[in-house]
Amino acid sequence: MSQMMLELLLRSLWETVLMTAASGLISLVFGLPLGLALVATDRGGIAEQLWLNRILGGIVNAFRSVPFIILLVALIPLTRLIVGTSIGTWAAIVPLAIAATPYYARIAEVSLREVDRGLVEAVRAMGGGRWAIIREVLVPEALPGIVAGFTVTLVTLVGASAMAGAIGAGGLGDLAIRYGYQRFETAVMVAVVIVLIVLVSGIQWAGDRLVARLDRRA
Amino acid sequence: MNQHFSSTDLTLSPGFAAPSGDVVRIVDLKRRFGRTPAVDGVSLTVRKGEILGIIGRSGAGKSTLIRCLNGLERPDAGQIFVEGREITGLGERELQPLRRRIGMIFQHFNLLSAKTVEDNVALPLKIEGRPKAERLARAAELLDLVGLADKAKAYPASLSGGQKQRVGIARALAARPALLLSDEATSALDPETTRSILSLLKDINRKLGLTILLITHEMEVVRTIADRVAVLDAGRIIEEGAVWSVFADPQSEVTRSLLGGIRPQLPGEIAGRLARSGGEAILRVDIAGEAARLPLLQDLSAAIPGRYRLVHGGIDHIQGEPVGTLFLGVGIAAGRLAEAVEFLNARGARAEVLGHVTDDA
């Protein structure tokens, strides 16, 4: 592989890491509260509001139903509004984050739902309000699952970012398609796949380590 | 330690001051789930400093009743006064300061797995907004009280069941409550651990003067630590009184069946051979209080000579009162049996002829 190819590979890796990290972070910031809201407003939740629960659930489902490649194009006006342009790495972060947020919200919701109701009751019995329940019970007790779910989301984002090449965002997937597939440069394809395997494995390993450190349940 | 439980920080509205001595007063409380009443008109008073046991089979409404006391469950009708203040009808926000006056321990401990033991114990104070130094000092003090000072930095998952419940007790005491609610706190523990937890609770009750309301389905728990007992069945209190007197003279079938496990029963192999007549009469004699202090058997054999044999039974001491059941094998003339029963009953015992057996070796 030529020097140029190596540089291209490194740049693509950086673009993938940037897209994954930025959209992952945004999905964490918005997805976790959304997941909390889904649990809290549901029947028997700490802030039961069934109509709100249905609306939130409907929005989440709607976004999760749209294929990412469609979302990517459909969101172009919004992307232009936020980033100022509809092409490039930063422009891809908007649809990636918007797709990942409801995805992560559902994963976080599952972990939060698994928190023993007895613990919520114990904190209520000691005079704790909703905030105390969220801060002292729901989030800390669900944290291993929340982190594990975030790991899954990041890995999914690595995959989804390959499609962002369609709007000129670059990244490893784009490199594989343009050089490896369209120009039949097998070496590039193999190199990209190896880098992706290492990247995904690294994310998974780091996530698993963190979960093991956080999990005090056994 | 006693000054921690002073009543300086409790807010009694002057109009509702309870007769001093009552921590909780429940008036005609009702709660139904769908069409099934869980609590069906319960009136009950918990006196300051006592341990009141509420016993019942599962589904009797015990949990619903105890959860009404700190507002975890909303009653449909009736009133609850805690330290003289009516809590029925209060909103969630108004209930929060009140719940800090009421500690609660649970069957499954409900400790937070992500927090250390000391952080679990300090949590009620954190929720109250106390400074960290004060929280940790109080946690250390309480862990010392429950004998777990060395586990402060451990996580609950590394503790045994008994240790977890000790942490639960320490946590329930952190905010210096006026009342401790115990929701089947020993039901998940083995008998030996149960005894140690119960003696800890009794100890705390004595040392701190803490009022305890416990619910359980085990008579043994009531027998070990309660001063008074109320028997709950189908959402109603069917019997209530000092533990020793309820044990000595249970009025209802439910109470008798709950007592069945810990009171002496006629051994099955004798019960199976009971007949209408035979060589030896089998008498069941229940004695309690004064009657149990008399030389009853000696007096009986002096008055009505015959062959008296102790088949089975024993005398227990509950709250310092002797309470017992004896099964006697009696070999006297058939005509004098009624006389013997009368003799015993006249001295405060309750005797009844269960039947006759022959050839009991």
Image (cartoon, rainbow, N blue to C red):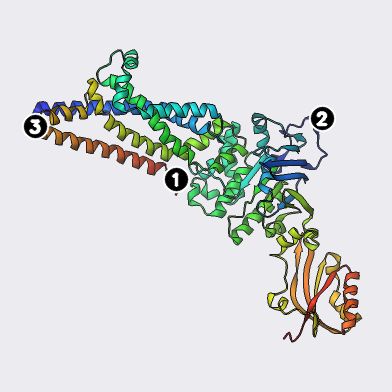
Number of residues whose C-alpha sits closer than 10 Å to that of mark 2, classed few (under 14), some (14–19) or many (20 or more): few
Q: Residue at x 29, y 19 (%)?
A: A91
Question: Which mark identifies residue A1?
Answer: 3
Q: Amino acid at mark 3?
A: Met
Instruction: Locate residue B23 relative to residue A110 in the image: left or right.
Output: right
In the image, residue A134 lies at what x, y percent? 52, 33
Instruction: Locate residue A107 relative to residue B120 in the image: left or right.
Output: left
Answer yes or no: is residue B232 visible: yes
Q: Residue at x 61, y 55 (%)?
A: B187
Q: Residue at x 75, y 41 (%)?
A: B29
The outermost residue toward the front is B35
Q: Amino acid at mark 2?
A: Gly
Instruction: Locate residue B215 relative to residue A124 in the image: left or right.
Output: right
Q: Chain of mark 1?
A: A
Q: Are marks 1 and 2 on the same chain?
A: no
Circle 1 is placed at which residue position? A216
Disc 2 vs disc 3: which is toward the camera?
A: 3
Circle 2 is placed at which residue position? B15
